[in-house]
């Protein structure tokens, strides 16, 4: 049954719609696969941010501020 429905969708041209802009962007990405310097810097920046966000960087305090009172 599932195969019949998929075959019918394909025959009617209802598989997946991709717009002209999607085709353009896909072709552009394939032709310009090398990243620019600013893109590399941005990737490095956000990789660092994600690392700092996801992993603790500060040591836990052994004493509390209130221990002195």
Image (spheres, rainbow, N blue to C red):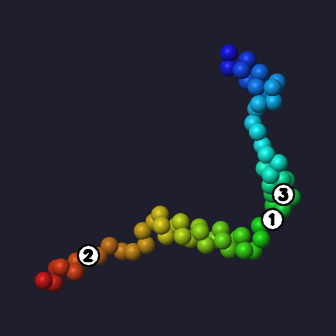
Q: Which residue is the site of mark 2?
A: 62
Q: Nearer the viewer, mark 2 or mark 1?
A: 1
Name above or below for residue 8 compared with residue 14. above
**Residue that lies at the very extreme toward the top in this rendered image:** 1
Quadrant of the rendered structure where residue 36 is? bottom right
Residue 2 point in image, percent of width and height: 68, 20
- How would you rate the neighbour count of disc 2 (Cα within 10 Å): few for under 14, some for 14-19, many for 20 or more? few
Outermost bottom residue: 68
Q: Which residue is mark 3?
A: 28
**Residue ID at (79%, 46%):** 19
Question: Which mark sits nearer the N-terminus, 3 or 2?
Answer: 3
Task: Please tell me whether mark 1 sits on a helix, a strand or a loop.
Answer: loop
Task: Looking at the picture, tell me which residue is in the foreground, 61 or 7.
Answer: 7
Q: CA distance from mark 3 to mark 2?
A: 55 Å
Residue at which label 1 appears: 34
Which is more N-terminal, label 1 or label 2?
A: 1
- Please say if 62 is above or below 17: below
- In terms of secondary structure, where does tag 2 sit? loop
The residue lying furthest to the left in this view is 69
Instruction: In this rendered view, identify the residue nearer to me: 36 or 58.
Output: 36
Real-space Cα separation, disc 2 to disc 1, in angstroms: 49 Å
Q: Quadrant of residue 16?
A: top right
The picture places residue 50, in percent across and down from the top left corner, at 53, 66
């Amino acid at each position: 049954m599932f195969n019949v429905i998929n075959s019918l969708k394909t025959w009617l041209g209802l598989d997946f719609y991709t717009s002209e802009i999607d085709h353009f962007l896909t072709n552009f990405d394939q032709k310009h696969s090398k990243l620019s310097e600013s893109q590399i810097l941005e990737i490095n920046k956000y990789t660092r941010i994600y690392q700092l966000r996801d992993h603790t960087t500060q040591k836990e305090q052994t004493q509390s501020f209130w221990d002195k009172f």
